[in-house]
Amino acid sequence: MSAVAVIPARYGATRFPGKPLAKETGKFLVQHVYERVSEARRISAAVVATDDDRIADAVRAFGGQVSMTRADHPSGTDRVAEVARGLPEDAIILNVQGDEPEVDPAALDQLVDRMEREPQRGMATIAAPMPAGDPADPSRVKVVVNPRGEALYFSRALIPYHRDLDGRAPASTYLLHLGVYAYRRAFLFAFAALPATPLEQAERLEQLRALEHGHSIAVEIVDRASTGIDTPEEYKQFVARYRSGMEADRVGAG
């Protein structure tokens, strides 16, 4: 059984237009994602899904695989589903956002392992203990799980509510949802065809559509959270971390 990572990337992000092509590190942002995904030992192929010729040209320039998709997709999931129609029926398909340059290859392997252990599982995702910072930040999506390691709910609000602590607990007691998904191919098509649901629209979290329609989502807990890039400021922080890591490697090699 093969696992293929599809990386949806679009040019017109509202808060950071042209984000996939940001190149202050010397590499395109989408290239960082592609290279990290390619390090995962359980992933047989990676492909960038885009409707923009500029992004496609950049991917080809660094030797990556790209698939051109329609421009009218309402979400990255729909873009991934279009690419999946050309993949084998038994493939496990990972949706890795094009703004996750620090995604952990080991976490992707862990997610594929979970899908293979549970052959009837249609959908899975990953979460990690909340890192330092404000856990109430609505951009940090929280998830609560049942004893079987399945999602009970995802929210931008603080969940669970710790009554004895006036609603707040140490950050590390919350689970931070990381926006990486794995699907069975048939389930991906069924999920993409489902109508939007009230909770999904209220929280602006697409995964709630699956829960509201009665489907379970496995949640694999990994050790470390990765940081997505939503704004130019977050990109600058990533560039600083990348340069610091390069400098540390240079000193270590010397």
Image: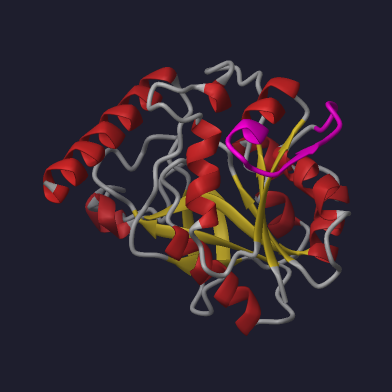
On screen, residue 27 versus residue 18, left or right, reads: left
**Near-viewer residue (160 or 109):** 109
Give the image location of residue 37, x and y in percent. Answer: 53, 53
**Near-viewer residue (158 or 184):** 184
Classify residue 121 by image quadrant. bottom right
Give the image location of residue 35, x and y in percent. Answer: 50, 47
Classify residue 45 by image quadrant. bottom right
Numbered label tally:
0
State the extent of the magenta-drawn residues as a range: 59-73
Q: Is residue 239 magenta?
A: no
- Residue at point 62% right, 41% down? 63
Give the image location of residue 244, x and y in percent. Answer: 21, 35
- Residue at point 26% right, 32% down? 243
For the stretch drawn in magenta, what is the main secondary structure?
loop
Where, quadrant-wise, is the N terminus in this rendering?
bottom right
On screen, residue 133 versus residue 51, left or right, reads: left
**Near-viewer residue (249 or 175):** 249
- In this view, the residue farthest toward the front is 254
Q: Is residue 62 magenta?
A: yes
- Residue at point 88% right, 54% down? 85
How is colour applied across the structure in the image? secondary structure
Is 250 drawn above or below residue 39 in the view shown?
above
- Residue at point 57% right, 70% down? 42
Give the image location of residue 197, x and y in percent. Answer: 77, 44
